[in-house]
Image (tube, helix red, strand yellow):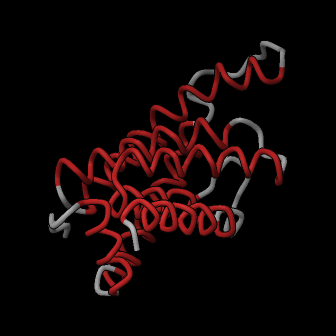
Amino acid sequence: MNSKVRKITYLAMMIALDVVLSPILRIEGMAPMSSVINILAGVLMGPLYATVMAVCCGIIRMLLMGIPPLALTGAVFGALLAGVGARLTRNIYGSIIGEIIGTGIIGSLVSYPVMVLFTGTKTDLYWLLYTPRFLGATLMGAVAAWLIWQQAKKISLFKDMMQVFNGKRVIR
């Protein structure tokens, strides 16, 4: 099968996993399963495809599940930095740190002005309103992603995904 077709197929699979799994264990303002998929996508697919995945998933969740724009602000920065972290360190720990910084810190801070624009009202919300929940979700997601990765990295499908997206580079 053509490499581009395989990349699109794997991307579609990760989008489907994120959309189906993100409502599981969802607490308002916290989506730890989304962090799990962002971290795994960062390691498996790199920054570009992980970010595309997060944008698609955010839009789908907003349209189908009625989730506010937090679905985008929370996931996109985390997916991008998870992919960058994985590429720089060539291991899941870089992806985890990228997700925590991207979603837990940057995404939470960007969410405040976006929600003020979305609701059309300036409230007494403060800039760090979303940070504890976003950080909590990313930390729960990071633990779950690490546990899943310990077994998933042995599966031939995941090995194939890493080779398709990362060439012959070894990711631990």
- Farthest top residue in view: 122
Q: Nearer the viewer, residue 160 or 89?
A: 160
Q: Is residue 125 above or below residue 27?
A: above
Q: Is residue 90 left or right of residue 134?
A: left
What x and y, as percent, mark residue 61?
Answer: 74, 51
Q: Is residue 25 left or right of residue 78?
A: right
Q: Nearer the viewer, residue 36 or 170?
A: 170
What x and y, as percent, mark residue 80?
Answer: 41, 42
- Residue in view at x 71 percent, y 57 percent: 27
Q: In the figure, residue 18 lies in which quadrant?
A: bottom right
- Residue in view at x 84 percent, y 47 percent: 66
Q: Specify whether residue 140 is in view.
A: no
Q: Nearer the viewer, residue 11 or 147?
A: 11
Q: Nearer the viewer, residue 2 or 106?
A: 2
Q: Specify whether residue 6 is in view.
A: yes
Image quadrant holding the C terminus, namely: bottom left
Q: Is residue 116 above or below residue 26?
A: above
Q: Is residue 96 above or below residue 149?
A: above
Q: In the figure, residue 114 lies in which quadrant?
A: top right
What x and y, as percent, mark residue 47?
Answer: 36, 46
- Residue in view at x 77 percent, y 45 percent: 62
- Farthest front residue in view: 2
What x and y, as percent, mark residue 96?
Answer: 34, 55
Image quadrant holding the N terminus, namely: bottom left
Q: How many marks?
A: 0
Q: Is residue 146 left or right of residue 49?
A: left
Q: Is residue 91 left or right of residue 131?
A: left
Q: Is residue 158 above or below residue 76?
A: below
